[in-house]
Amino acid sequence: MEEIISVGKILNFHGIAGIAKVGYSNIDIIKGLKKIYLSSTENNEKKEQFTVTSVNFHKNFALIKFKEINSINELMPYKGSFIYINKKQAEDSLDEDEFLIEDLIGLNAFDNNDDLIGVIVDVKTSNGNDILCVKSSSLDEDGREILIPFAREIVPVVDITKKKVVIKPIEGLL
């Protein structure tokens, strides 16, 4: 099996026809779903392939119908399960200035003078902007975490191949 990544989580059901209520972070990836993988809560190791027949949106959730699931009872074993897709499929749906969260974690963060600030250890998603969590490389600061809004004005350079981001220094941020 190709490398797979999580793109959402089944939070609950919607109605009686086995429609999954899904939390997600990237609407474009969710809109383009065709084939996904799920693990039931009973057998978390085995991933089964499912075909997406429809994706609709209600409030801040995706409502996803799978060809193979036709009732609440058939969906219940997957409640709480993550939705996985092939990493290549996710990358193909991204715009030029979009990145997978997992590709950002581990990148070195530098300032405009090419001085190392730290390493990205996490990315928190919110309704506004994503937030980069950078573990400081400064020895005198006990490796504190710096929270950086992931916006082009603040993070003008992201180079996945060089494993590097550049953060524009803003007073009080660094």
Image (cartoon, rainbow, N blue to C red):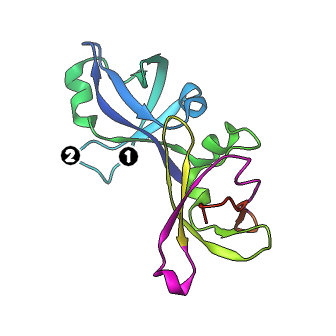
**Hey, what amino acid is under mark 2?**
Glu
SS at mark 2 in the image: loop
Label 1 sits on residue: 47
**Hey, what amino acid is under mark 1?**
Lys
Residue in the foreground of this view, choosing between 16 and 138:
138
Q: Residue 79: x and y, percent? A: 26, 34
Residue in the foreground of this view, choosing between 58 and 53:
58
Task: Tell which residue pokes out farthest to the right in this image.
Answer: 113
SS at mark 1 in the image: loop
Residue in the foreground of this view, choosing between 150 and 77:
150
**Residue 2 visible, this angle:** no
Is residue 146 part of the magenta span, yes or no?
yes
Task: Tell which residue pokes out farthest to the bottom in this image.
Answer: 139
Label 2 sits on residue: 42
Compared to residue 156, the image places residue 53 above or below, namely: above
Residue in the foreground of this view, choosing between 165 and 128:
128
Residue at x 61% of width, y 42% of height: 90
The residue range painted magenta reads: 136-160
Q: Residue 142: x and y, percent? A: 46, 81
Measure the C-alpha gap from mark 2 to mark 1: 11 Å
The quarter of the picture where residue 89 lies is top right
Q: How many marks?
A: 2
The quarter of the picture where residue 163 lies is bottom right
- The crowding category of the residue bearing disc 2, from other C-alpha atoms within 10 Å (few below 14, some 14 to 19, many at least 20), is few
In the picture, measured across the screen, residue 47 lies left or right of residue 57, that is: left
Of the image marks 2 and 1, the number of the one nearer the N terminus: 2
Residue at x 51% of width, y 50% of height: 4
In the picture, measured across the screen, residue 108 lies left or right of residue 39, that is: right
